[in-house]
Image (cartoon, coloured by chain):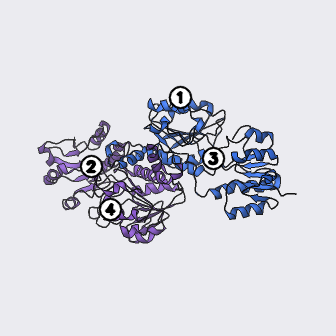
Chain colours: A purple, B blue
Amino acid sequence: MTKPIIFLQRPFREEFIDKIQAIAPAYQIKTALTPDEFSAVEISVGWSKEFHEQLLAANQLKWVQALSAGIDSLPLAEFSAKNILLSNGSGIHALSISEHIIGVLLGYYRGLYQAVKNQEQKNWGHDAIQYDQLAGKNLLVVGTGHIGQQLSKSIRSLGVNVYGINTTGHPAEGFVETYSIKNLAKIVPGMDIVIGILPGTDETYHIFNSDIFEKMKKDALFINVGRGDTVHTKELLTAPKEKYFAFAALDVFEEEPLPKESPLWTLDNLLITPHISGMTVDFQNKFMQIFLANLKNYVATNELAVNQVELQRGY
Amino acid sequence: MTKPIIFLQRPFREEFIDKIQAIAPAYQIKTALTPDEFSAVEISVGWSKEFHEQLLAANQLKWVQALSAGIDSLPLAEFSAKNILLSNGSGIHALSISEHIIGVLLGYYRGLYQAVKNQEQKNWGHDAIQYDQLAGKNLLVVGTGHIGQQLSKSIRSLGVNVYGINTTGHPAEGFVETYSIKNLAKIVPGMDIVIGILPGTDETYHIFNSDIFEKMKKDALFINVGRGDTVHTKELLTAPKEKYFAFAALDVFEEEPLPKESPLWTLDNLLITPHISGMTVDFQNKFMQIFLANLKNYVATNELAVNQVELQRGY
């Protein structure tokens, strides 16, 4: 009988291949497959449209370890129907995204974006620089998972008061107070900064819309690093123009790359970053902490240790 | 006999004028002077070239409370000869400068400056973004005063290892280790980030020169928010070109505003900000905490409570 296959859909360093093999000696480790081999894949590390059909058709797949935190583009219903386990990469990107958010906020408050533009014109421009202070601000994290908790931990120490929103308002570590998502519109008016870190689900689709934008403080900031479609882009487009809030920074979009013809590009109170907040140094090491912990458990008990996705819930 | 005058060289809110008068009822408070009145000025809040001659000639001046931390442009030798006390505004700007530095660092590490430029071209540019992680970096604060200590406190909590340099290497709160300024060139090679926060004195003039730049790590960052002439600008100009270090950010310059013809403007690994790092919200409140404490002491004992400048030393 053919040994079952662990299919790595991206390359990893030799040291990690060795560790995988040591934990799972009964498996073959492959980074490319012949057509015959798909039927032996039991564990897939990563998921791509390219091999989607073959892997599901073979009916041997038992566990998909996604590389990313977001898994809403994966076939969750089919995984559920076939009892395929799914775990995600949640946590790997938390520190990077937290640093990205703090950088975006301070870049705005300290006038750095204006300075970059002035420098291109050789323009000293001292008097045009707007500045403010991060310390003392009230910040709302919408989504109190790994990333939200890391952000809270880091930014609290800079003197920011951090509030949280999650599904039920259950307490989460490091938040002054947490509220249920259904209270979003009630909480927003008291906040200087609103950060979207939501997964893509039916419940979160277009949750940041004009009902929310118009309740924000006129000098407030809105940042989205969650799923692009949690923001109602068309309604955001009218919001800054009418000065519902002072500044927005988007790292994710309903369509990526953002098309050239998008009117977002030229809004003067919007910072566009190209889905980079999660880019992280030492990805392989951070990822393997999750995968190897899960693999050890899976080999022993056919169950996962961490980051298992509830397929019905979608995160 | 004319009441002695407290001369405010900038406006302050009514609430602060009232507090000054309550502490010092024997004094007149003036924000503008007739020619006759200069001879009655005992305390000057702020110092400008405009009134320099008149105030010194009148021989009644006993105390100058500067508005800024840097006082190297003031006539220290004349103050010393006439036994005029000098106190500065050190500490007022510490939080702002700390936020500025953290913002500049994260802006670089998270690729935000490149993103701002890309956005102007409607260019998604995902693959051109360079990124790195702030957490885990070794940072050297050259100047462990108020600002250095505030920076250390804030940035340590983001996972940065903070080392300090001061005149003698005396310990300072919140630094892993402190070294004497004469060891600067020996310490720089182990650092990912070097921050200049030095006052302008004979000893610090051009202290950041090619001897230091060439010892920096090739992927290191250099930031100056101290005095402009602590940097040897001509030698800095050749340094980035030859890739002694990866990136520099200057908020202060030997000549300000930076002249249009300066070659600094177009260096692609240099961020220029127009002496804004110290700009702070609620300046009056922060300043008055220093001035009123000093005034109380001065009225009672003719001595100052905080922030007195040693005129010989120059800070």
Q: Amino acid at mark 2?
A: Val
| Tag in front: 2 or 1 | 1
Q: Which mark is first along the chain, 1 or 3?
A: 3
Q: State which chain disc 2 sits on.
A: A
Could you tell me how far apart the alpha carbons at marks 3 and 1 are, in whole angstroms? 27 Å
Which residue position holds label 2? A299
Which residue position holds label 3? B146
Q: Amino acid at mark 3?
A: His
Could you tell me how far apart the alpha carbons at marks 2 and 4 are, in whole angstroms? 45 Å
Which residue position holds label 1? B210
As helix, strand or loop, the secondary structure at mark 4 comes to helix
| Tag in front: 3 or 2 | 3
- Residue toward you, A23 or A291: A291
Residue A12 lies, in percent from the top left, at 29, 40
- Which part of the image, by quadrant, shows the N terminus of chain B? bottom right
Q: Amino acid at mark 1?
A: Ser
As helix, strand or loop, the secondary structure at mark 3 comes to helix
Q: Amino acid at mark 4?
A: Thr
Which residue position holds label 4? A233
Q: State which chain disc 4 sits on.
A: A
